[in-house]
Image (tube, rainbow, N blue to C red):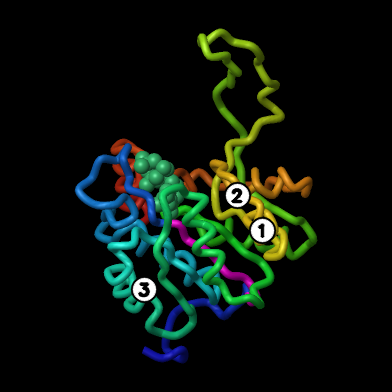
Amino acid sequence: MSTDDCTHDARTLEGAGVVVVAAGSGTRLGADRPKAFVEVGGDSLIEHALHVIAVTGIGEVVLVVPADRVAHAQEMVELETGCGCVHATVVAGGAERTDSVAAGLAALPPQTEVVLVHDAARCLTPPEVFTRVVDAVRAGAAGVVPGLPVVDTIKVVDERGVITATPERAGLRAVQTPQGFAADVLRAAYASATTATDDAALVEALGHEVVVVEGHPHAFKITGPADLADAERLLAQMR
Ligand code: CTP
Ligand code: MG
């Protein structure tokens, strides 16, 4: 297939690159293989994520997978990106998510201006969320995360489970991926990184402003078996 006859959008998000982290083991899902290689609706989470990214028009992808899965992932990537619209690289991840992001970041071309970091586990995130995040970084934000209002009341507890605070719900957001950053800001954050559950926290720790844009319910993270069943239902509805 050549660029002329592929169905992907033009490269509307030129200068942006995305690191897709897929190197986790998926302990909570408990499948017979690493979570990102599990199939839902006939495709693996990695393949779903690559389909969406191709539609966004982002031309540069680094896929981070377990070290013993690099060759397998390379085959998937070649099938998904054969048209040449997307340039994709596969690298081995590390023990913690932070290690995997760092490995992916190191493999992005140095001229990348906007870096997105995306969980393969959020493989049904719609293209519009990617666009919103890149647009907000281009508009000047150091960091941008998609998020949704929290529906449950959240409690802060101490080590005994005793509630120590009840934050005002209106000021809370449940955040998702892709998280987007000016490339130099994210590289600086990772140069001094310890570990954190999301990339925004590392950038916040450097004193940069990170803004929340509207996320999407379909950007939920496939964590346990019930989430996989939800994804299966959602894909069936979308067909
Ligand atoms: N991830 C990664 N490298 C790690 C750990 C996580 O690339 N060392 C990725 C996962 O593949 C996933 C995303 O980070 O796409 C979010 O992590 P999570 O949902 O916790 O996935 P797992 O770590 O695989 O699952 P679990 O914690 O249940 O083992
Ligand atoms: Mg994990």
Mark 3 → mark 1, Cα distance in angstroms: 25 Å
Residue at the disc numbered 2: 199
Q: Secondary structure at mark 1?
A: helix
Q: Secondary structure at mark 2?
A: helix
Numbered range of the magenta stretch? 14-21
Whether tag 2 and tag 1 are in contact, CB under 8 A, the answer is: yes
Q: Percent x, y for residue 221?
A: 44, 44
Does any portion of residue 50 appear in the rendered image? Answer: yes
**Quarter holding residue 37:** bottom left
Q: Percent x, y for residue 24?
A: 37, 50
Q: Residues within 10 Å of mark 1 (few under 14, many from 20)?
A: many
Q: Is residue 130 left or right of residue 119?
A: right
- Which residue type carries mark 2? Asp
Q: Residue at x 41, y 49 (%)?
A: 95
Upstream in sequence: badge 2 or badge 3: 3
Q: Which circle marks residue 186 in the picture?
A: 1
- Which residue type carries mark 1? Leu
Q: Residue at x 29, y 71 (%)?
A: 71
Residue 79 or residue 237, whichever sits in front: 79
Q: Which circle marks residue 77 in the picture?
A: 3
Does any portion of residue 239 appear in the rendered image? Answer: no
The answer to whether 122 is drawn above or below residue 59 in the figure is above
Q: Secondary structure at mark 3?
A: helix
Dominant secondary structure (helix, strand or loop) of the stretch shown in magenta: strand
Residue 203 or residue 15, whichever sits in front: 203
Q: Residue at x 55, y 57 (%)?
A: 117
